[in-house]
Amino acid sequence: MGRHSVDGSGDGSSSAADGFDVQERWAQDTAVLEVWGDFDLLTTPRFNEAVAAVIAKSPTALIVDLTEVTFLASAGINALVAAQRASESLRFAVVADGPVTGRPIKILGLDEILSLHAAMDDALAAVQ
């Protein structure tokens, strides 16, 4: 399966007017959701829809990549925890590093719950 936007556009480009997007790609049986832009109260419904859609495809693991997130609000963090709970039967990991994404997750102590990794290669290795 190729990389495509959750909105079905298929071209992998961000189509959201607000700069937020969630794109799905696959690494064998592992689903990867790449999140772009501000991850906040207004954008979490689109993230939640993407999580539900990808779980319905029965991956063996789910990785959420926050590398391109420019702002991570508490609503976004709550959505990550909810995604981890929704995918309890799957291996789950989050790629987040730096002050915008990794730091708030670590400060809240959620790095243990969310299986936090600094790089995609580390996350892929952890869910294999």
Image (cartoon, helix red, strand yellow):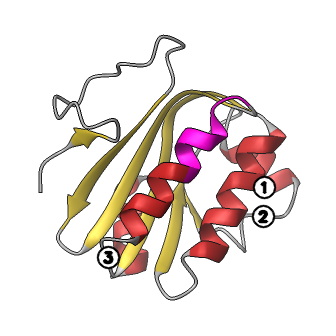
The extreme right residue here reads 108
Mark 2 Cα shell of 10 Å, populated few (<14), some (14-19), many (≥20): some
Q: Which residues are magenta?
A: 42-48
Side of 107 relative to 5 (left or right): right
User: Mark 3 belongs to which amino acid?
Assistant: Pro
**Does 75 lie within the magenta span?**
no
Describe the element under mark 2 as helix, strand or loop: loop
User: Mark 2 belongs to which amino acid?
Assistant: Leu
Q: Main secondary structure of the magenta part?
A: helix
The extreme left residue here reads 1
Side of 69 relative to 65 (left or right): right
| Label whose residue precedes the other's in the sequence (1 or 3) | 3
Mark 1 Cα shell of 10 Å, populated few (<14), some (14-19), many (≥20): some
Q: Which residue is mark 1?
A: 106
Side of 95 relative to 111 (left or right): left
User: Mark 1 belongs to which amino acid?
Assistant: Lys
Please provide percent x and percent y for residue 6. 34, 41
Taking depth in this image into account, of 53 and 119 the one nearest to the observer is 53
Please provide percent x and percent y for residue 45. 62, 42
**Which mark's residue is nearer the viewer, 2 or 1?**
2
**Which mark's residue is nearer the viewer, 1 or 3?**
3
Q: Which residue is mark 3?
A: 59
* Residue sitting at x 84%, y 63%: 109
Q: Which residue is mark 2?
A: 110
Q: Are marks 2 and 1 in contact (CB under 8 Å)?
A: yes
